[in-house]
Amino acid sequence: MQTEHLAEEAAASALVIFGASGDLTRRKLFPALYNLALSKALPSGFAAIGVARRPKSDASFAGEMKEGVERYSRSGPIDEAAWSRLAEGVAYVAGTFESPETYAALQARLSAFDASHGTSGSRVYYLAVAPQDVLGMVRALSDAGLLPRATREPGRPFARVVVEKPFGEDKASAQALSQQLYRYIDESQLYRIDHYLGKETIQNLIVLRFGNAIFEPLWNRNHVSHVEITVAEDIGIEGRGKFYERVGITRDIVQNHLLQLLTIVAMEPPVALDADAIRDEKVKVLRSIRPLSGEAVSANVVRGQYKKGQLGGEKVPGYREEPDVARDSTTDTFVAMRLFLDSWRWAGVPFFVRAGKRLSRRVAEVAVHFRAPPLSLFRGPSFAQRAPNALVIRVQPDESIELRFDTKVPGAGMAMEEAAMAFRYQTTFGGSSPEAYERLILDALRGDATLFTRADEVEAQWGFIDPILQAWRRKSAPLSFYESGTMGPVEADQLVATAGFTWRRP
C-alpha cells in the first residue's frame, strides 16, 4: 500500500459530506467545523459541501447548520465572525447517490471552490451514510474522476474517504468490503472513523503511559491485579429498534469502542509516534486476546437485555416494549466479558469489560487495579476490606485521571480512608476540551491516520467477536435480564466475583 505524506498543518482542501441532511452532520460535524474555525485551525483555503437527496439551497443548508452549531457547539454563544468565515465556503448539492448528475454537480461546485478558495483539487469525502451505500458511492466518485489514487509526490492534491462504523458485520464482510474498496482507492486513503479515539482522555492515555516514567515499571502482570473497562449509557435505543435488532451492543460498542480502549491500555510502547507504529502495537494486542468460543463463551461472557424500570424518577419501557423490536427478541443490550491477553506483559491478568444501555448512569472509564501489598501491617476488622490502589481514567463525562490510594485519617489511632490525587481537564485547562470530531476531522484534513482504524485492526476485532456471536446464534449461551436503572444483570457481578473482585462503582 502507498503511504501519503503526513503534513503538520492542514492543507487547503474541501470537505464533502455525503448524507448531509442527517443528524450526525447537524449535531456533530458542523459544530466541530465551527469550533475549528473559531480556533483558526482550519486551513485558510477551505470549503464544506453537503450532499443529500432533499432539495435545499446553499443558504437554507447553511442556516440549518448554524442552528445546529447554536444548539450543540461546546463553545457557547456563536461568534458571528467565525461563523461567517466558515459559511463563505459552505454549499449544498441535492441529488441521489446513484445519479451521475449528482457527481457532475458536485464536480462543478468543487471546481468553483478551487478557483474562489484555493482548495487546489484536494478533497476529503465524509460518508455519513448507511454501510451498504459506501461501496457504491466510492465507485461513483471514482467513475466521475473525483477520487484519484494516492500519490507519493509531495504537494500533489489528495483525495481521502472517511467511513463511519460499522465497517462490515463480521470478519468476512469486513475483508470483502476492504478488497472491493481497494479497486478504487488505496488503504492510505481510507479513514475508518471511531469517534472514541478522538476523545481527549483516550489520546492522553498514550501520554500518561509513555510520557511518564513512574507508571511504566508498574504497568504489567507483576503489579496489576486486574483491569476494568466500562462503557455505560443511561439512554435506551432511542427509536432505533430496527437498527438494534440487527446489530446489538456487542457489534455497536464492544467490537469497536471497547476493544480500541483495550488496545491503548494494553499496548507496548510504539517505536515512534506515527500512525503505523501505533496501530502495529494495537493489532498485536488484538491478536493476543485469548479466543472465546463454544463453552468458553458461557463461562466468560454475560449477555443481557434491559427490562422496564426507572431512570431519573421516570418509568421507562423494557427493550422488548420498544418500537420495531420483536416481543421475543434475544438482542443484547448489555455484555460483560472476562478476557485474558496471552502476552508477556499481561499473562494471567484478567480484563473485565462491560458495555450496556439503560444503566444507572452514563460513564466510560478504565480502572487499573494494582495488587495489594505482599504483607499487611495494618490488622483488624477496619482494614480487612480495604480496596487496592487504582488508577482510574475517566473518558466521559468529566474527563479526569485519578490515582486512588489509602491514607491515614487525622487523629489518634490508625484509621484509614481512601483518597485521590486527581487531574481534571476543566479544572486544569479551563473551559471544555475539544470534541472528538474536531480532532478527527482535522486529522483527516492533515492526513494523519493515527486515530483511525486500519484494515487489519478491524479484521482482528471481528476475528475475536465472531465466535461469540456464533455461540449466541446457536443458543449455547443464556440471555440474562436486568432492570433499567441498574448496572446490569447479577450474572455480570458473579462473573467478577468468581475471580475474587467486584465491579468498581463509577
Image (cartoon, rainbow, N blue to C red):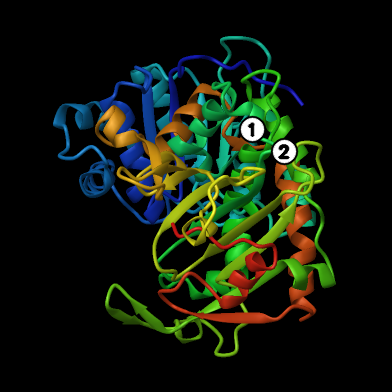
Disc 2/disc 1 C-alpha distance (Å) = 7 Å
Q: What residue is rendered at 59% in x and 45% in y? A: 261
Q: Residue 421: horizontal and vertical position, in percent?
A: 39, 36
* Circle 2 SS class: loop
Q: Is residue 127 above or below residue 210?
A: below
Q: Residue 43: horizontal and vertical position, in percent?
A: 38, 19
Q: Is residue 4 above or below residue 397?
A: above
In the image, what residue type sits under mark 1? Answer: Leu
In the image, what residue type sits under mark 2? Answer: Asn
Furthest residue in direction bottom, as rendered: 327
Q: Residue 404: horizontal and vertical position, in percent?
A: 46, 43
The residue carrying pointer 2 sits among few (fewer than 14), some (14 to 19) or many (20 or more) residues within 10 Å by Cα, namely some
Q: Residue 218: which disc?
A: 1
Front residue of 415 and 102: 415
Give the image quarter of residue 295.
bottom right
* Circle 1 SS class: helix
Q: Is residue 363 above or below residue 106?
A: below
Examine the rendering and report whether any part of residue 183 can be seen: no
Give the image quarter of residue 469.
bottom right
Q: What residue is rendered at 28% in x and 41% in y? A: 58
Front residue of 244 and 287: 287
Q: What residue is rendered at 59% in x and 24% in y? A: 210
Quarter holding the C terminus is bottom left
Front residue of 389 and 205: 389
Q: Residue 222: which disc?
A: 2
Quarter holding the N terminus is top right
Q: Residue 363: horizontal and vertical position, in percent?
A: 43, 55
